[in-house]
Image (cartoon, rainbow, N blue to C red):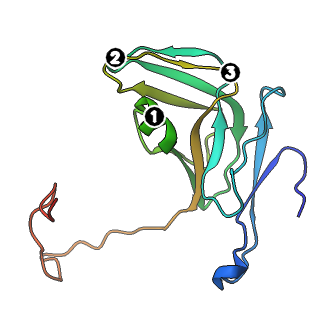
Amino acid sequence: MSAPLGSIVLGVANSTAGNTPRQPTNVPVKRLDLDLPLPAPAHAGDAGIDLHARVDALLPARGGRVLVATGIAVAIPVGFFGQVVPRSGLALKHGISLVNTPGIIDSGYRGELQVIMINTDPVNDYQVKRGDRIAQLIIQEVVATTWQVVEELGGEDRGGGFGHSGR
């Protein structure tokens, strides 16, 4: 399947798993930097779409933070939202993560996607280079919610929370 230039097509059918093929969701994308690759999943069926750094940036060790532009703006359709999440390899190998993870992108946002990166390594600074894959974007459907005020909550309270389910 080919997508129009300037579009991200999401949703890859996984017929080998017996899933019913689903129509892809078309997300318009504005390329703010034509020298950067259009975001894409690394492999067919991946949920995350790699986002690239638009600029060089130095993340100092011991909690250094920096806002890194990605060179794209998107128009996520109403009924969907985006999540910007860390890349596991950066976290494992270099202690690099995102400050507000997941970062939520609502369907009404039209500005450049930017990523607040943090270096948790206690010793080594980390150099982000223009074009590096720095985070992943995941597009998901919104589940509409209404509140039902009740006097008591049904079901059994398992108790605890914050680590009470074991190691």
- Pick the quarter of the image with the C terminus: bottom left
Q: Residue 23 in the image: x percent, y percent? A: 76, 72
Gap in Å between the C-alphas at discs 2 and 3? 23 Å
Q: CA distance from mark 3 to mark 1?
A: 19 Å
For image coordinates 68% across by 56% down, the residue present is: 77
Mark number for residue 130? 3
Q: Which residue corresponds to the image point at 78% horizontal and 35% vertical from the top-left?
A: 37
Instruction: Report the disc number at residue 145.
Output: none
Question: Mark 1 sits on what residue?
Answer: 93
Q: Is residue 81 above or below residue 100?
A: below
Mark carried by residue 123: 2
Q: Is residue 28 left or right of residue 97?
A: right
In the image, taking residue 27 as reference, residue 139 lies left or right, namely left
Which is nearer the eye, 132 or 139?
Answer: 132
First of labels 2, 3 by sequence position? 2
The residue type indicated by label 2 comes to Val
